Image: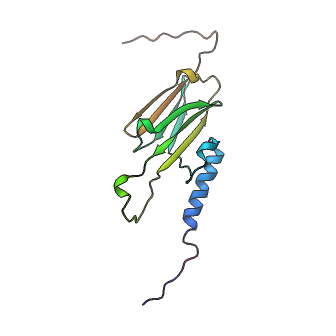
Amino acid sequence: MGKSHWDKWRGMDEFREQMDRLLDAARHGLPQCCLSGPGLVWMPLADVVETPQALIARIELPGVGQDQVLVEIVDGALVVRGERPVDREDAEASHHLMERAHGAFARRFPLPDGADGEGISAVLRHGLLVVVVPKRRAAGSPRRTLTLE
């Protein structure tokens, strides 16, 4: 029988990744409820752009249903949170590699001045959540009419 070698650093990469996620969550100011629980929060990838009319967030949520996502405005920020369920068919399997995150997720994006939280809209389609937070028109600004062609 061959000699087995114990690698004392084997779990350090996973520990470092979990600490990075926790620090990112704290840096982004996620709500406390999203930082507790049995596992760490994972943060889905997002692009956020600001136009003169709105703040637009596009968040990757493959495998997440509409009933598993909450989108809200909290303390001047757009907060998106929810949960991606574990694949049921894999529950009894022996995993060789697991890179896709499951469980609770959360993202928090500060809103610009003039954001209109009442006019928020969100659509989840093909694993991409698109959230649009319009901006209020400044008082006294001229109204613009578009001509349709």
Question: Looking at the picture, does residue 91 appear above or below residue 1?
Answer: above
> Residue 135, position in %: x, y?
57, 22
> Residue 42, position in %: x, y?
53, 49
Quarter of the image where one finds residue 73: top right
> Residue 109, position in %: x, y?
59, 36
The residue located at (61%, 11%) in the rendering is 141
Question: Looking at the picture, does residue 13 appear above or below residue 33?
Answer: below
Query: Does 8 appear in magenta?
Result: yes
In the rendered view, does 131 fall on the left or right side of 30? left
Quarter of the image where one finds residue 126: top left
In depth, the one of 55 and 7 nearer the eye is: 7
In the rendered view, does 100 fall on the left or right side of 74? left
Residue that extends furthest to the bottom in the rendered view of this protein: 1
Colour mapping: rainbow
Query: Does 31 appear in magenta?
Result: no
Quarter of the image where one finds residue 78: top right
Query: Magenta region: which residues?
Result: 6-10
The residue located at (59%, 44%) in the rendering is 34
In depth, the one of 46 and 76 nearer the eye is: 76
The residue located at (58%, 50%) in the rendering is 37
Q: Quadrant of the N terminus?
A: bottom left
Q: Quadrant of the C terminus?
A: top left
**Residue 77 showing in the rendered view:** yes
> Residue 64, position in %: x, y?
42, 42
Question: Looking at the picture, does residue 50 appear above or below residue 36?
Answer: above
**Residue 28 showing in the rendered view:** no
Q: How many marks?
A: 0
The residue located at (54%, 72%) in the rendering is 10
**Magenta stretch secondary structure, dominant:** loop
Question: Looking at the picture, does residue 110 appear above or below residue 37?
Answer: above
